[in-house]
Amino acid sequence: MLAELGRLAFFDPSLSASGRQSCASCHDPAHAYGPPNALAVQPGGPDLGRYGGRAVPALRYLRRVPIWTHTQPGTFKERVEIGDNMPSGGYTWDGRFDRPATQAAFPLLNADEMANADAAAVAARLARSRYAARFREAFGTDILSRPDDALAALGQALERFQFDDPSFQPFDSKFDRVLDGKAGFSEQEARGYALFVDEQRGNCASCHPVDKGANGARPVFTDYNFQTLGVPRNAEIPANADPHYYDLGLCGPLRRDKRDEKSYCGMFRTPTLRNVAIRGAFFHNGRFHTLTDALRFYVQRDTNPEKWYPHPDGPQPFDDLPVEYQGNVDRRNAPMTNHRGGKPVWNDAEIADVAAFLGTLTDADARPVPRAP
Amino acid sequence: MSRKIKGAALATAVALGLCAGLGALVACSDDNHDDAIRTQQDIKHVFVITLENKDFEESFGTDKPASGQDTFLKQLATQGALLTEYFGTGHVSLDNYIAMMSGQPSTVDTETDCFGLWSDIVDDGNDETNAKVLKAGTDANGHAGGGCVYPARVKTFAHQLDAQGYSWKGYMGDMGNDLNRDGTMTCSFPTRTDLLAHKDISKTKDLTQNAQAAAASSDVKEDQYATRHNPFVYFHSIIDDTDYCDAHVVPLTYPDASGKGLEADLKSIDTTPNFVFVTPNLCDDGHDGDGTGAAGKGCKNGAPGGLASIDAFLQKWIPLIMASPAYQKDGLIIINFDESNASSSPMTTTFNSDYSQMNLTINLQGDSCCKQQAGPNVKRPDDQVLTTLPVAFASTLGIDTSKLPPSVKVIQIGMHYVGVGGDRTGAVLLSKAIKPGTVSYTGYNHYSLLKSLEDIFETGEYLGYADDEALLPFGDDVFTNLKK
């Protein structure tokens, strides 16, 4: 069975150059297949001495990720009318893979992650694995002598595991029980929920939708759209030591096919908020280490920019975006429509309420990561 | 099989590989005197296919960038009648569809596609100058002359057909592909969908404005149905009786395994409705994408969209319809466009005093024909501010930012409505009652279409603005091959 092969590979550290890192090292099932610690970015590479550039997402609830698209009406008037018609979909923070099967090669070959030199190295490691025979059985006896096909086959198996194994979509959080009428929110959670969906005072649900689909699909708290939130630069990421390096998400440099689309620079795909409360690193660059700080950033980004950015009055107020892309930052969607000195839509007690509500999105088995030291 | 079709037309039909589907059928049925069409009223099967947002010069001309994308449609135009002076009745989409099926003019919300809302039209009585036109009151959103869904007393062409004992169906591309999005496979509309999702319907929005791409897991289905291109669900007189609506407003091709849909219904005369209204999905109707096939310029399903996808759609469906017994016996196909793409008149730009804001105005020429009136709910000329965008977004809208003063930070986009119409789009009619190569220069619009349909099916009454003396129904200039 393909999913079973995928499971074996997912937990197999021998597939990495270090011999010590599997997919599960970064995507730990004990933490909803998210990172096991509060580091902004995880170690990897041949001797686990290198670091990636982005926070590790949890792999639960990704079956509904649509393929990446940005479709525009043919006429200018309708393009404007449907002005919130954002790019959407695709796996990873920049949506560069349409399915997990093609995504899998990336960590396997990335020098900062599992660090195989090439497909042949992966095939050689597969050939030495204890499931090599089953792999040949599933994909043909000569599969491991065809490295590119072997890598693709491994991707398929990993995809089947992530799609089919029930541990990737348990839907057994308190929120799900509330949805099913089997539990009730506490007073604080209910207040937090109300703020989360309030279009005037949070508007979170406009990008992180909370409703069931008409055919019963449970909400996964993302519309998969891309937005530029202007999250502050994170000095904890080694690559950021170079002042000329910027992770611009959808427009690159990791993603290569949209480099010319200026409006895409700074955009990242909206993540699911299921299991967000167990995390110790938030947003694409892991800039915040508590949920409270992440929420405070939303409501105070514009009212108190000095809290978040070193030079809020300079030409580059949003410090993780080059000057020419400052205008890309979302100021159209509440709560990011506030102004300097304005009253944040939530006070600290309300932030705590929303955090409590987000806590109801934690699956029954998902444990919080140890706090950052 | 005898072929009477004249040299040039036959040659092109053969070149297109369509002889059996197109040229031959038109020609062959000529010989079948039992089914001769002597008057328009002998036509018993009408197929309307409404496409999106193209200027006449794009669809039927030669000198626009997109003009080369629809060779099939251009060939079809030579097989029947090309109505060179056919006009849309509004901008944007929705008001055009409503005009075709009810004769009602725009409200301030239908003229913007009921974008981001879904409200009832408040019955404010009839227009003083035309008792057949409903005056829209102030709707739940506080929009004077606004609202989307007509009160039950407003009747449509569908009801006229019912009264005459004629059958009808609206076939909607992709409707129900993803039930989490569309709610139901038949008769899908936003409040019905929201009720199924247990949502508060006082806040209902039309969430089918943007097409949806599929997920690799297939948990999410590709779905390019757009409610705003489905006229039938904007009438309480249709949607309040869900059984009735479910039986009549159906998917073009059922997304389940039933095999149902227009293709199946075309198999026999018994199963082919007398009136068929086809709304292709947002890609097939040319709404999405630019038709070039360039990466990132296409539809949610990767097809090029624009006139190229229109052409592919017609290449599939026109031969199917033409091969159907109903069409061959007494059929008429009408291919029209809801409106132009409003590209003909230049946009105007002004700047504020410190050059930090550019004001971009889309001039909607809104050319019309036939003394079209604005009706009681909207005014012309009119100005509306649509949105204010950071300058960085300009390039996604196709604005060349390199030519702008560097001080510009935001672009305010507004619309200036000049006229009331939807500009000249042209239309194509196909039938054995029409000689290949027919070209009409008479002014027509969506209200004339309705008036003509009412004539053909002898409804005995003209609805809304179809009841206008100045308005001509399709006449002998179009039906050039009636057997005397």
Image: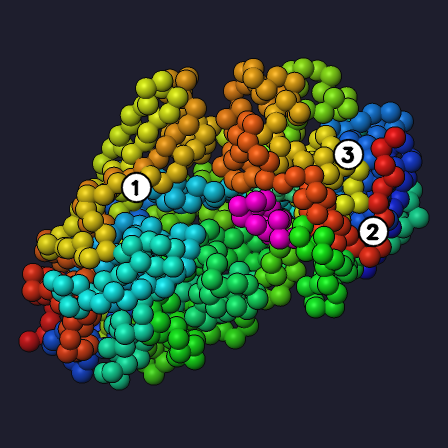
Seen from the viewer's position, the closer of residues B144 and A260 is B144
Q: Position of residue A175 (x, y in %)?
A: 72, 58
Q: Secondary structure at mark 2?
A: loop
Q: Nearer the viewer, residue A327 or B187?
A: A327
Q: Residues within 10 Å of mark 3 (few under 14, many from 20)?
A: some
What span is colored magenta in the figure?
A193-209
Numbered disc 3: what chain? A
Q: Nearer the viewer, residue B242 or B35?
A: B242
Residue type at the position of mark 1 = Gln
Specify few, some or many for label 1: CA neighbours under 10 Å numbering under 14, 14-19, or 20 or more.
few
Is the N terminus of chain A in the top left, top right, bottom left or bottom right quadrant? bottom right
Tell me the tag on residue A366.
2
Query: Given the image, what chain letter belongs to the residue carrying mark 2?
Result: A
The answer to whether dots 2 and 3 both sit on one chain is yes
* Chain containing the residue with disc 1: B
Q: Residue at x 14, y 55 (%)?
A: B372
Instruction: Reply yes or no: does residue A205 show up in magenta.
Output: yes
Under mark 3, the amino acid is His
Q: Which residue is mark 3?
A: A289
Q: Amino acid at mark 2?
A: Ala
Residue A9 is at least partly visible in this image? no
Q: Is residue B155 left or right of residue A200?
A: left
Q: Residue at x 55, y 69 (%)?
A: B196
Q: Disc number at residue B384?
A: 1
The nearer-to-camera label among 2 and 3 is 3
- Based on the displayed image, in which of its 4 quarters is residue B444 positioned? bottom left
Sequence-first tag of 2 and 3: 3
With B473 as the anchor, is A329 left or right in this view? right
Task: For mark 1, give the secondary structure.
Answer: strand
